[in-house]
Amino acid sequence: MPIDRQSPDPTAADVTTVTSREVYRNAWMSVREDEICRRDGTAGIFGVVDRPLGAVVIARRTRDGVVQFYLVEQFRYPVSARRWEFPAGTSPDSDDALTVARRELLEETGLESDDLRVLSVIDVAPGFTSQRSAVVLADDPRPGTARLEHEEQDLLGRWWTRDEIVEAIRTGGVVDAQTLAAWACLSVYDA
């Protein structure tokens, strides 16, 4: 399912771009600096991180009458800490949410699911990045073979109950913004 990046209507914009230049690029992102003019005529500047479509995958199963969710833990360099989160990632070669979700689920967990559906699309951090992520529910996944990227070699994972996730959110054990947003989307979906 392609995700519309929803380009704003330029006639309704609060700002117009005067100039834009790329200042950095690697395989996962690019950074640009835009000089802008606000509606009142004043000048400004924005630094924007551009990243491809992402997917946050909620793998869910029921065992012995208990609903469980799969989370992964990995070291997150920018915050110098390990974080528990739903499997997530981007794919520069696809703008299809289910393709990205299927790839990330298998890559990070070794799980596969034939029952994938997009629950929502979130703006990851619209104050500085254009990235959007699809929140994808993967019901009843089955074991496959994990295909961790080199950067993910420290990744751990396990099944959690709903109560364990709620307690981890309450106590600060789960703080990843995309995971929290995905959990909120699932709560609305399941309501």
Image (cartoon, grey):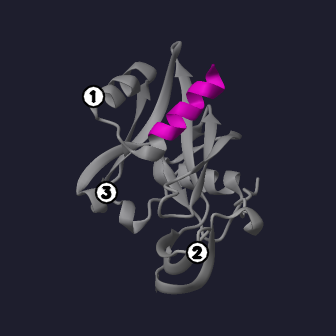
| Residue 188 visible to the viewer | yes
* Disc number for residue 41: 2
Q: Are marks 1 and 2 in contact (CB under 8 Å)?
A: no
Q: Which residues are magenta?
A: 180-191
Residue at the top extreme of this rendering: 65
Establish if 120 lies above or below 46: above
Give the labeled residue for mark 1.
Answer: 171
Q: Residue at x 33, y 23 (%)?
A: 167
Q: Residue at x 61, y 61 (%)?
A: 53
What separation in Å lies between label 3 and label 2 (alpha carbons)? 40 Å
Q: Is residue 133 left or right of residue 148?
A: right
| Residue 86 visible to the viewer | no
Q: Earlier in the sequence, mark 3 or mark 2?
A: 2
Mark whose residue sits in front, 3 or 1: 1
What separation in Å lies between label 1 and label 2 (alpha carbons)? 46 Å
Where disc 3 sits, the SS reads strand
Mark 3, other Cα within 10 Å: few <14 / some 14–19 / many ≥20: few
Q: Quadrant of residue 52?
A: bottom right
Position in image of residue 131 (x %, y %): 56, 61
What separation in Å lies between label 3 and label 1 (alpha carbons)? 19 Å
